Image (spheres, rainbow, N blue to C red):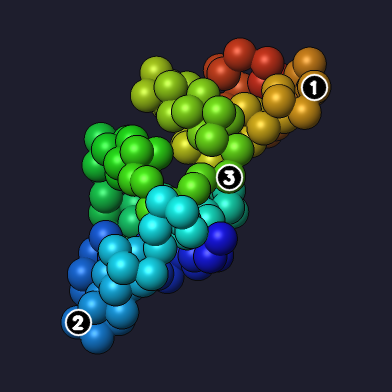
Amino acid sequence: MIGVDTNILVRFVTKDDVKQTKLAEHLLQTICTSDNPGYVNSAVLVEVLWVLKRFYGASKENLIRLVEQLLIINQLELANRDAVEQALQLYRDSKADFADCLILSLNLKAGCEVSFTFDKAASKLPAFERLS
């Protein structure tokens, strides 16, 4: 398996640097295979979405589409795939950020009955409670 960092995925998606885009495309389309996939850990996934939203103005719909695409690409393996799928559904149906949805999904998977937050939008998710 091959680890893939945030900046590789950002270049692959945004294509904003010709040289780095070509290198990222080569890695993800040639070196990463279904037999030897690129590994995208949860921190990388969250960071990619944050960068795309914050610096590239990506809409929620575009971020949802990206996660959906990442989930079906055979050349990539997303860490905690089941939690990512659950987080994606929570994200679709709420005003919370994807990161908060993934935090909740990972916490539930770890056996947490409740997770506390100061975040108003996240506190609307099931099993999240706002600490006040």
Disc 2: which residue:
18
Number of residues whose C-alpha sits closer than 10 Å to that of mark 2, classed few (under 14), some (14–19) or many (20 or more): few
Q: Is residue 95 left or right of residue 26?
A: right
Q: Are marks 2 and 1 in contact (CB under 8 Å)?
A: no
Q: Residue at x 41, y 51 (%)?
A: 34
Task: Pinpoint residue 99: horizontal percent, then vertical percent.
Answer: 54, 41
**Depth check: 61 or 27 in front?**
27
Q: Amino acid at mark 3?
A: Ala
Residue 79: give its label: 3
Q: Is residue 101 above or below residue 29?
A: above
Reading the chain from its start, which is encountered first: label 3 or label 1? 3
Q: Residue at x 61, y 13 (%)?
A: 126
Task: Pinpoint residue 26: horizontal percent, then vertical percent.
Answer: 29, 73
Q: Amino acid at mark 2?
A: Val
Q: Quadrant of residue 92?
A: top left
Q: Is residue 53 left or right of residue 85?
A: left
Q: Residue at x 54, y 35 (%)?
A: 81
Q: Mark 1 falls on what kind of element? A: loop
Q: Is residue 27 above or below residue 114?
A: below
